Image (cartoon, grey):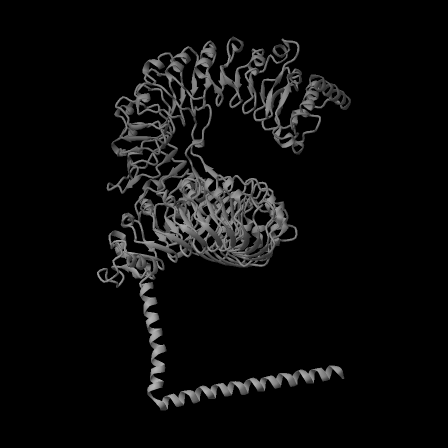
Amino acid sequence: MKKEALWVFVVVWGIACLCGSHGCQGQERVALLALNATLDLTYRGDTGGSYFNCCSWEGVECNPTTGRITQLMLPYSRYHRFGSKTWYLNASLLLPFEELKSLDLQSNYLGGWIAPEEQNLLSSRLSKLEYLDLSYNSLNNSILSILGTIPSLHRLLLKDSNLSGTLHVNGCFNHLKELDISCNAVIVVATVEGIKNLSHLENLYLDGVHLKDVGTVMQALGALSSLKILSLQYNTIEGMITTQDFHNFSKLEQLILDYSSLNTTMGILSSLGPLTSLRLLSSYSTGLSGKLSDRSLCNLIKLEELDLSINGITGGLPTCWRNMTSIRVLFLEDNEFTNNVASSPLISLTSLELLSISGNYFDIPSSLGPLANYSRLKVLLLDDNNLTTDSRVVSSIPKFQLTVFRMSNSLSKGFKVTSLGFLNHQYDLRTIDLSSNDIAGPFPAWLLENNTKLENLLMANNLFATLEVPLMTLHNLSVMDMSNNGMRGELTTEFCLNVPNLSHLNLSANRLEGNIPYELGSIKSLYTLDLSHNNFSGGLPIQLIDSNSSLHRLSVAYNNLQGEIVFSDDTKNLHWLCLKLEHNMFTGDLSFLSSLVNLFRLHVSNNFFIGKLPRVIANMSSLALLDLSKNQLNGLIPQELFNLPQLQYLALSDNNLSGSLASSFIAPQLSHIHLNGNKLNGSIVHLLPNSSNLVTLDLSENEFVGSIPYWLGNLSQLSILLLRGNSFYGRFPKQLCRLKSLSMIDLSKNNLFGPLPICLGPMNFSSGGYAKVASTQFHLSNLELSPISYVRTIRSQTRFYHDRLLVDEAMQVPHIVGFTTKRRFDAYKGYALLNMIGLDFSCNNFSGEIPPEIAISQDMLVLNLSHNKLTGHIPMSLSNLTKIESIDLSYNNLIGSIPEELTQLISLEVFNVSYNDLSGAIPNKNQFGSFDESSYYGNHLLCGLPLSNDCSTTVNINCPATKSCRKAKEDGFIDGETFYISFGVSYTMVLLVIPVVLFINPQWRQGWFHYVELVITTCQSLFITCYYFVQDGFRKLSSGRTI
């Protein structure tokens, strides 16, 4: 391998020398070209760069004076060209870069370095290398011995690089100031012992390494006398941390514990007293609970940034926080604080630039009077609190000028924006969020007039009557969400012209009407447009689908739009990611899809599209969701459709598609298949044998035949199996009993026979496996509205703050599944679908007894075994179905009584055992007192209310086991022995009475014999006539043939 790399190096060097040097040193350009054999290096030709000026290449930076390369930032440079195959870097290729200071090779599937044969070459040639990032590769511990020969390293990042065991990072890294060994399977205690001699180390990242015996670890880390930043995120921290463990961290400025499981209450916060130099403490989502003690964090007087978000902290803030006047950034969101802001220590923290107390129980006066002296305040987040109307008249003007103000879901119904008087004095707002407050009255256009720099306006879920914007051009407005307000009127041309730089517009769930203005197409920056759930009519403006548009996500679902969708001839390969047209009246075929091959999601259900499925869909390599259901499509399903590599959700239900399916589905990501309500036929024996990700399979109401395939039992993720209304035959495959995530199974209206399998119990029906169905979402790049970007922060590594995302309801998957329950066929979605657990084997030919194991799951809601040939008794184990709502056992041959234990089913709403051979008294306790007589029709030996049969007059089936009692139970209300005796006596009497009557009365006797003679004579005459008629006919037929 070394010889091959050297040969490539020499050849490329020769070529480069012939071509000359332009902008970078010749040997370095040769080395880059050699690296290009294993990485995918590109140059920026659009900025004036050339192929031979390597300083213009992507990721390459040079010293402007000497032209020598100082930075090589080449992350993610291999996969696109070479795939995910592991490779090894010949470190000799780096030797020409003698001025190199920074090298980034993260996420390149690097397996290691091949060191030069001469030991000191790396240390001498790379003597200026200070920054090295090899994170997210497939290295091993041997890389440390190679890197240890580069003494100039200051920052070494080896995050998630397949390191393990004890890492020997010792004296070879004497100048190291930053080390990141996060997300490796290292033995922390031993590794920390090995690095405690790094006297210059300032920043240490031990995220995701599982801290066992954390006290010992902290004591060892105390030897790092220069340590300023310690990050212990994403850890399960075991053991106790005491005040003594932090005594040697006198210089520590940042302690980051985010997403770690502290397994403690407030003890850790009380033990941080010795950290008197601490400027940043972040304990975001660490499981803290309980009240803060009176002295919590009180010694941290230099603290500037504090984040205790997403924990379970209760009660008020410690009074000593009044002295923490250095705090600039304070995140307390999503806890259970209960302070009144007017009397809390918050009023003393006048240095605050960012205050987030969202998701608590703070009482906040609407005037924000207690915060009026916050002259530095830029970001104020008050979502999900309780804003109260301030009875006092506050005349003073607040000292702050907010940049971000969020107060969603905090006002009582009917609150008006004018009650927020401080907003009249805000002129620098960039983001304002008043969503979900049921604010009534006219739209506050004055907010837009006062804040001409406004970028994000979020007013969804209120009660504004009309959409009014000021008669001025809002050049900076980028995001506008006015969804779910019930606004009436039309979307005007003036509105479209006044927001020329919008990127995201959401007006869904209103009552807007009229045509969609074509001027929306003039907003060339528009990325997301959601007009769904309105009353728009007419067609889809062709300007919206112009090739010059930047539109990526369009939803006009649930309107009254109509007509064909036609793209202009020059509109090709649009960059649309999501198109939602469902529930309109669009017509024509789907040929317009030829311009949308980049789609990620396509929803066009519930329209009037006709024709065949276009084969162009097979070219949509990024397509993850395809919903063409409830149209008038016909023909075959193209086999290419099942080869899409990213397809996860396929819905073609309720069309006129026909023919058999492809021999097998190849789509590796396919999770949900809805093909119900078509005319598909043939066998499915070889359909999906390897679809391990399948969660939903709905093939109901088709014409499939054959047996139910055994491979269904191999689909470990399968939660919904619906095969209703086909012609499947055979026995129930026992392999299906291996499905441990099953929530719904419907095999009704087929030709299945044989006994119900005892293994139904181990199928373990539960909603746990089904949660991934109801919550299915296909995330696109949502818009982050991050408040932290508006204030300065000392945090060395950014994290995802719990910020609001602009996620459109209409952009989520409307996963709907049909199932019969409570005597009706319902469509389930959302929360109802998440909790739906049912079994329907009705309308088949199953026989034998009902296995008691069928009731093993207490979460089952629906059990339907009606219209079969089941025998035996109703199992008492059905009383274990404590959540059951519907039981249907009608039209079978069940015997015995209705178990009294079933009266314990307090959730039971429908109970049907009609047309069986049940007997005895009907239970009338609890829910059974509400069932009418239709639940018991056709059981002649049942008695008691609601039937009219009185149990005192009905055959007592509880009598001793005599022959007549057994016959009454087994054969119904007619005794067979009595019937045969009475029939014999009656027949004998008739035979005796007729001769006696004829003997006694001569006139009757004469008439009787005359009648018999007349019948015999008539029959003889008819026979003779027919005989000669047939004979004459044959004679004539024979004469005709002879002639």
Residue 98 appears anywhere in the view: yes
| Residue found at the far right of this picture | 18
- Residue located at (63% from left, 53% from top): 568
Instruction: Identify whether 603 is placed above or below 1036.
Output: above
Q: Quadrant of the N terminus?
A: top right
Instruction: Identify whether 168 is placed above or below 1043.
Output: above
| Residue found at the far left of this picture | 952
Quadrant position of residue 121: top right
**Residue 832 spot, x, y in % from top left:** 39, 48
Residue 486 appears anywhere in the view: no
- Residue located at (44% from left, 32% from top): 790
Residue 242 appears left or right of 606 = left
- Residue located at (32% from left, 22% from top): 269
Quadrant position of residue 980: bottom left
Q: Nearer the viewer, residue 558 or 1023?
A: 1023
**Residue 297 spot, x, y in % from top left:** 31, 21
**Residue 260 spot, x, y in % from top left:** 40, 25
Q: Nearer the viewer, residue 1039 or 727?
A: 1039
Q: Quadrant of the C terminus?
A: bottom right
